[in-house]
Image (tube, grey):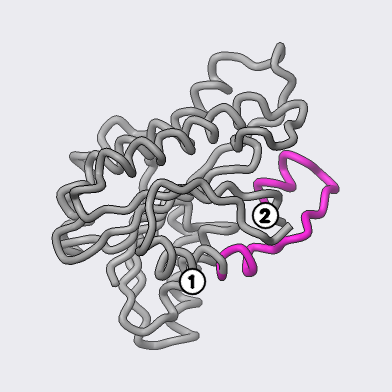
Amino acid sequence: MNILITGASRGIGRETAKQLTLIDGNKVIAVSRNKAKLEELRSECKALNGKSQLITLPFDLTSDNIKDELFPKIVHEVDHLDILINNAGFLVNKPFLELDSEDIQKVFNTNLFAVIKLIQMLLPLMGKHGKTSIVNIGSIGGYKGSDKFTGLSIYSASKGALSTLSECLAEEFKDLNINVNCLALGGVNTEMLHQAFPGYKAPVNPEQMAAYIVDFCQGEGMQSSGKVIVPDLW
């Protein structure tokens, strides 16, 4: 399978990219702003499996030049995509009245607008050689009726928008051989979580969460579409 995953340099994205890469036959394109961390990941995968196919593409997905700069690099590596995992995320933990325009822009640029631009850009590579599965990594904070937390208004709003976008695209792409689903994740012990909530320990680690995502992408994500799913891990 040809797979592209964003936010692959740390946390859930890094572990998911690694687990997918170590499956024989998968070619994984890992995208992140952090070039050094991507190189570390590639070295680790090669050490674990000399046949692993991990392509690292350092890039800032919020850039206005995404189509001119990133797309040619992707099509140089693959002629189609089987799986797209939109995992890159940005979290601000700040009371609503203290948020400024920069905070809001950074959150929505990464969590929503970059996803929109990436899907639009990559659509020509999807559904042409069998089913393509798009998996958007959302948050329980953006899930209707879930418990909400002070300081996460903008982050949760961006993830709620991502959930709705996923449902809408599933309908729009249903005749294009493309499935779209959203996984609304709870707290996972990642660097991003610890930066936002110092001292908090979540009950799920990145390896467990990645294993769920890998299984979903290659299984249910290929069979169903239009779902917003809260994994049964908490």
Residue 18 got which mark?
Answer: 1
Spot occupied by residue 205 in the image (x, y as percentages of width and height): 70, 63
Residue 27 got which mark?
Answer: none
The quarter of the image holding the N terminus is bottom left
**In-front residue for pair 198/58:** 198
Residue positioned 49% across, 22% down in the render: 105
Type of residue at label 2?
Thr
Image height of 199 relative to 172, above or below: below
Q: How crowded is mark 1: few (under 14 residues within 10 Å), some or many (20 or more)?
A: many
**In-front residue for pair 166/226:** 226
**In-front residue for pair 187/74:** 187
Type of residue at label 1?
Lys
79 sits left or right of 90 in the view: left
**Residue behind mark 2:** 190
Spot occupied by residue 231 in the image (x, y as percentages of width and height): 61, 57
Count of picture labels:
2
Q: Does the rendering let one see residue 98?
A: yes
User: Is residue 141 highlighted in magenta?
Assistant: no
User: Is residue 201 highlighted in magenta?
Assistant: yes
Identify the magenta region: 191-211
Q: Does the rendering let one see residue 32?
A: no
90 sits left or right of 169 in the view: right
Q: Is mark 1 on a helix, strand or loop?
A: helix
Q: Residues within 10 Å of mark 2 (few under 14, many from 20)?
A: some
Residue positioned 39% across, 88% down in the render: 50
Q: Quadrant of residue 118?
A: top left
59 sits left or right of 149 in the view: left
Q: Is mark 2 on a helix, strand or loop?
A: loop
Image height of 62 relative to 194, above or below: above
Which residue reaches farthest top?
Answer: 97
**In-front residue for pair 96/61:** 96
